[in-house]
Image (spheres, grey):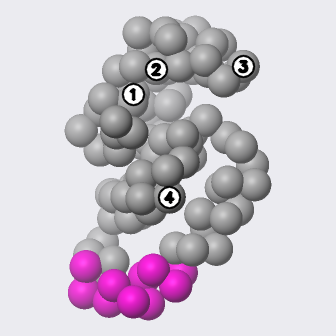
Amino acid sequence: GIYNLVEPDTSDAVLEPKLRCIADTRADFVATGNPGCLMQIGAGLLRSGSTTRAVHPVDLLDAALSGSLSGSLSGSHNSSHINALNSAPNAPHHD
């Protein structure tokens, strides 16, 4: 929920190992259904300069079922659906 807002120091201490694990995977996306986790992980990825996007599992499933994830598996984020995922309100942007 709002743990990252009411306990920012503890939340950051919990976040750092998660970000390292995510970076080690070199994944294009990390999915979480918890809105607080989505915001915390997404913000952490953005602050760290990662190209990994935090997305909701339903958005990831939709992209996979529509076949628009194939380009992202090779590191390309050119498909229109992947771009839509990257511009979703809950996904961080890397400008």
Query: Separation of disc 3 and disc 4 at Cα?
Result: 22 Å
Residue 67: name its quadrant: top right
First reached walking from the N terminus: tag 2 or tag 4: 4
Please tell me how crowded label 1 is: few (under 14), some (14-19), or many (20+) other residues with Cα within 10 Å. Answer: many
Query: Separation of disc 3 and disc 1 at Cα?
Result: 17 Å
Determine the residue positioned at 61% across, 68% down: 18
Depth-wise, is mark 3 or mark 4 nearer the camera? 4
Residue type beneath disc 3: Ser
The boundaries of the magenta stretch are 5-14
Instruction: Answer whether labels 2 and 1 touch (C-beta < 8 Å).
Output: yes
First reached walking from the N terminus: tag 3 or tag 1: 3
Determine the residue positioned at 35% across, 44% down: 92
Instruction: Answer whether labels 3 and 4 touch (C-beta < 8 Å).
Output: no
Report the residue marked by disc 4: 48
Query: Separation of disc 2 and disc 1 at Cα?
Result: 5 Å
Query: Separation of disc 2 and disc 3 at Cα?
Result: 13 Å
Query: Separation of disc 2 and disc 4 at Cα?
Result: 21 Å
Report the residue marked by disc 1: 85
Percent x, y for residue 23? 67, 54
Q: Is residue 32 visible?
A: no
First reached walking from the N terminus: tag 2 or tag 3: 3
Residue type beneath disc 2: Ile
Percent x, y for residue 77? 53, 19
Report the residue marked by disc 3: 74
Residue type beneath disc 1: Leu
Q: Secondary structure at mark 4?
A: helix
